[in-house]
Amino acid sequence: MSLDTVASPAVPPVATRHEQVGWYFYDWANSAFSTTVLAVFLGPYLTAVTEAAADADGFVYPLGAWLPIAADSFFPYMVSLSVVLQVFFLPVLGAISDYTHLKKRFLGIFAYVGAFATMGTYFLNGDNYLLGGVLFLVANLSFGAAMVFYNAFLVDIATPDERDKVSSQGWALGYLGGGILLLLNLIFLQLVAEPMGISTAHAVRICMASAGAWWAVFTIIPLRRLVQRNARKELPEGQGYIRVGFSQLGHTLRKLPQLPQTMLFLVAYLLYNDGIQTVIALSAQFGSQELGAGESTLVMLILMVQFVAFFGALGFGYLARWTGAKRAILISLVVWTAVTVYAYAFLESIPQFFAMAAVIGVVLGGSQALSRSLFSQMIPHGQEAEYFSLYEVSERGTSWMGPLVFGLALQFTDSYRVAILSVAIFFISGLILLPFVDVRRAITEAGNVPPEVV
């Protein structure tokens, strides 16, 4: 049995604006989970629930007395476990999807599993921390899996010349959707809940559940509009999805060295994206500890970045039309590096912190959206889900490096400014490696047609 799914070189897809807008709305749908649940509410709330279940020494025992876990470490451990699960499952799911041509069905399945798990957080109260941990694992794993299939649709709905614009518009709508729901939830939490006699804890559970409902409702739009272009491929007799998935994945990994430019881009992306993810994850801690920013200030900062990133993603999409995606990404990396230097040497006040965050918002969506569109040009036709699973897994598999460098710099220097400056290593690494990526060669090696501007 041949497992080579590359039937022919990629041809420009036939897609309408109607289908592209439908694709955008999945970013609008799932970004509610990223902002409302992950960025704001779940970590502090699940930690409080875990502390309520802890013994006098502050430990919980999810697997019995032989494995004590500090209550405030439970959520970070769940985050790490969810990453490990994604590293294991996503490549196999991507391979199964490409082999069977069922990526639309997989997108729907994992989107709704994640949405319903998120809605289940409404029942997270008292000391039931294990329920919270399981719901988070299911939701976050499903979120990552659905993103693989969502990203794989990009090559179906946009020609090579449209790819940067379409990817950027999808990312922009995601920031807008996530920001709008977060704003509505904050209004409810701060202005509506108390007059209605709703406790803060109950209001937080309503806010988290609303993200799942938002995710579920708006996923209807892409599922109705996206077109599955290949007929379902039946499994060979006597073989199951898992076996075929591992076989197809092995085939892809053996062929990956034949795409050296794609591999070089992937390495560069892993480094500079690790820097981006570190800034996202730790900038609130930096603002709190170094500048004394309060919780309400940090939430307002997150909201502002969401809306600025909407315009930034669109702006970088237009920029890529003139410069090409690679040059636009390089420009963003120069800005990212400058931001870390500014935070180290010049940042002194909360207004300056907001100004710096606005600059981050401008480059945040653009650098990520254009990385996605550029990678989509460099992968073989018919294997999009597999390669995007490697893209997602690689991002998560290295996401510990930036926080580790930040933590070590903080530990040895006792300076948050030195710690934030250390993150510049990742942006500078991207600036060094990315110019060596021959984009046109990478695209042709993958059997695709280069866009007009490379």
Image (cartoon, rainbow, N blue to C red):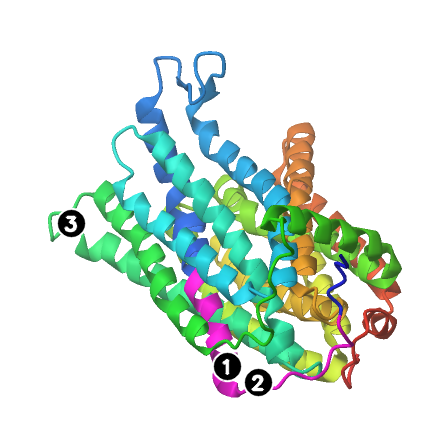
Label 1 neighbourhood size at 10 Å, few (<14), some (14-19), many (20+)? Answer: many
Label 3 neighbourhood size at 10 Å, few (<14), some (14-19), many (20+)? Answer: few
Under tag 3, what secondary structure? loop
Q: Looking at the picture, does residue 158 appear above or below residue 141?
A: below
Residue 403: percent from left, percent from top:
63, 40
What is the quadrant of the N terminus in the image?
bottom right
Q: Which mark is residue 19?
A: 1
Q: Nearer the viewer, mark 3 or mark 2?
A: 2
Residue 299 appears in the picture as rendered: no
Under tag 1, what secondary structure? helix
Residue 119 appears in the picture as rendered: yes
Q: CA distance from mark 3 to mark 1?
A: 42 Å
Magenta residues span 7-31
Q: Looking at the picture, does residue 79 appear above or below residue 96?
A: above
Q: Is residue 20 magenta?
A: yes
Marks 1 & 2, CB-CB < 8 Å contact: yes
Instruction: Tell me which residue sits at (72%, 62%) in the image.
Output: 333
Q: In the figure, residue 126 lies in which quadrant?
A: top left
Q: In the figure, residue 97 lies in which quadrant?
A: bottom right
Label 2 neighbourhood size at 10 Å, few (<14), some (14-19), many (20+)? Answer: some
Q: Looking at the picture, does residue 412 appear above or below residue 102?
A: above
Q: Along the polypeptide, which appears first: circle 3 or circle 2? A: 2
Quickly name the residue at label 3.
Answer: 194
The answer to which of 360 and 354 lies nearer the viewer is 360
Quickly name the residue at label 2.
Answer: 15
Instruction: Tell me which residue sits at (61%, 65%) in the image.
Output: 233
Residue 32: percent from left, percent from top:
41, 59
Q: Nearer the viewer, mark 3 or mark 1?
A: 1
Residue 247: percent from left, percent from top:
72, 49
Q: CA distance from mark 3 to mark 2?
A: 48 Å
The answer to which of 14 and 355 lies nearer the viewer is 14
